Image (cartoon, rainbow, N blue to C red):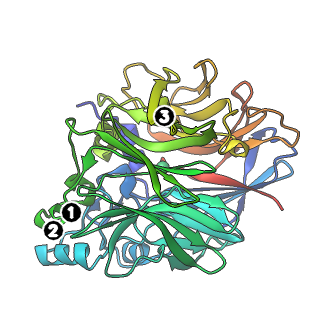
Amino acid sequence: MSINRAFQRVLDLKQTPQPLTKTTVEGEIPSWLNGDFYRNGPGLFGVGETRFAHWFDGLAMLHKFEIRSGAVQYQSRYIESKTSAAILEEGVFSYPEFATDPCKSIFKKLQSVFIPTQSDNPKVNVTRIEDRLMALGETRFQIEFDAATLQSKGVYSYGVKQTQAAMTTAHPYVEDSKMYNMVLKYGPFNSYNIVEYDAHTSITRSLCSIPTQSPSYIHSIGMSEKYFILLEYPFSVRSIDFVLFDRPFIQNFTWNSNRSTRIWIVDRKSQKVIFKDALKPFFSFHFINAYDTDGGVTFDIIQYPDAGIIDSFYLKNIVDFENNLAKGKLHRYDVDLAGGKWKSRQLSEISIELASKDNRYQYKGNYRYVYGMGLHNDDGKDFYNQLVKVDLSSGDAYCWFEEDCYPGEPVFVPSPQSQSDDEGVLLSILLTVSGSESSSDLLLLDAKDMREIARVRLPESILPGFHGFFDPAR
Ligand SMILES: [Fe+2]
């Protein structure tokens, strides 16, 4: 095993919450780019003697970049929760995370399943619904926060009862005051539930319930104007195993290559399943887009042959540059609902993850570009170290790469007169690890040619994080 010591040192960092601070900008930020860029992700990977095991385990920290007239102010804050209070104020790790459990007896483990004691540490994503900003995670606890201070304002949980074990996705779809997502309820009976959350009433309505014997780990669902798309991968769990085995959440899931990936398509209007089928086994975290076609629906995802990528994200594997990080590839599925058939194809050879697009093209088939982070080396022996732009019409890819640099999810912001989905800028938090030094910047690229146009110096190194969004100035 070849441990990259410099990267290990970075993962040992505990980030310090930053008050709103002016930054130094190198290069030139376009004068039209005015708004707030939010991002969520881990701010630390350990407390006391406890080291978190996995990239998906860290303590949630929000980052905000206020971009106005070419200047940038930056602030960060740990999300206030029971989880963060235990860690930051008491120095103890009390709640189970994705791949790390606190030490406890079997009895307490039982409690955590059937009288759920889940982490309220939404570290994965950020979104706006009406005037409410939400930090999003995969347990049922989502946290609203204040735009100016990033201070937590309250918890919502998709209407899931305290006595119900449940997981959700951190990738809801927002349409006006409504937010659509999937809630997995598990226990003696398991079901995937497509839900609609209303920000005006804070009421969650279940639209469609799909029973399952062995729930799968599902990170996102697809949605077009007419349909919901649910993919159930053969990376699944018998929910009794949560009780029988005293091990962290994700370690109860096993890959079964003899099983299929199953697809359900739900009509949004009738709220009924109108298509289901078994596909060859594969795994995916992220849907990128879905759009209705004449008699069907098409969706694009990042696909892996199996769920081994989750193992690659254990911290011990991230710092092991001999570990081969599996390469996610863009795939397109065309479903002919009238004919009851589907076909799929790979859209590009380039490796890609944490992908984004011009969100003006949500539900639209004429989008052409997907952006993401990827692996510069063909052998995959590193962590994500380049940004990529994929032309879906040709499969061609264009990259931004710089030695020792680890960029995060690129978020696309269109320019005011933008006529295509690459006329704008990409925002990405960059971690640079060189020798014993590390630093972070907000990187701005021209999406047209993937050329660097500005770099915003940040006061400390920021751990590799997950998702964010740009909130235009109003
Ligand atoms: Fe995600």
Residue 243 marker: 2
To which residue does mark 3 refer?
339
Give coordinates of residue 234: x percent, y percent: 27, 43
Residue 76 marker: none
Q: From where the camera sits, is residue 409 visible?
A: no
Relative side of 28 to 108, left or right: right
Other residues around mark 2 within 10 Å, as few (<14) / some (14–19) / many (≥20): some
Q: Residue at x 34, y 43 (%)?
A: 262
SS at circle 1: loop
Residue 239 marker: 1
Give the Cα separation between the discs numbered 3 and 2: 43 Å
Q: Earlier in the sequence, mark 3 or mark 1?
A: 1
Work out whether residue 321 or residue 137 is closer to the camera in this orientation and state it. Answer: 137
Give coordinates of residue 296: x percent, y percent: 56, 38
Give the Cα separation between the discs numbered 3 and 1: 36 Å
Tag nearer the camera, 3 or 1: 3
Query: Could you tell me the amino acid type at mark 3?
Result: Gly
Query: Could you tell me the amino acid type at mark 2?
Result: Val
Give the Cα separation between the discs numbered 2 and 1: 8 Å
- Give the residue furthest to the front: 339
Q: Earlier in the sequence, mark 3 or mark 2?
A: 2
Q: Residue at x 39, y 49 (%)?
A: 11
Q: Is residue 409 above or below residue 17?
A: above
Q: Residue at x 12, y 73 (%)?
A: 106
Tag nearer the camera, 2 or 1: 1
Q: From where the camera sits, is residue 261 visible?
A: yes
Tag nearer the camera, 3 or 2: 3
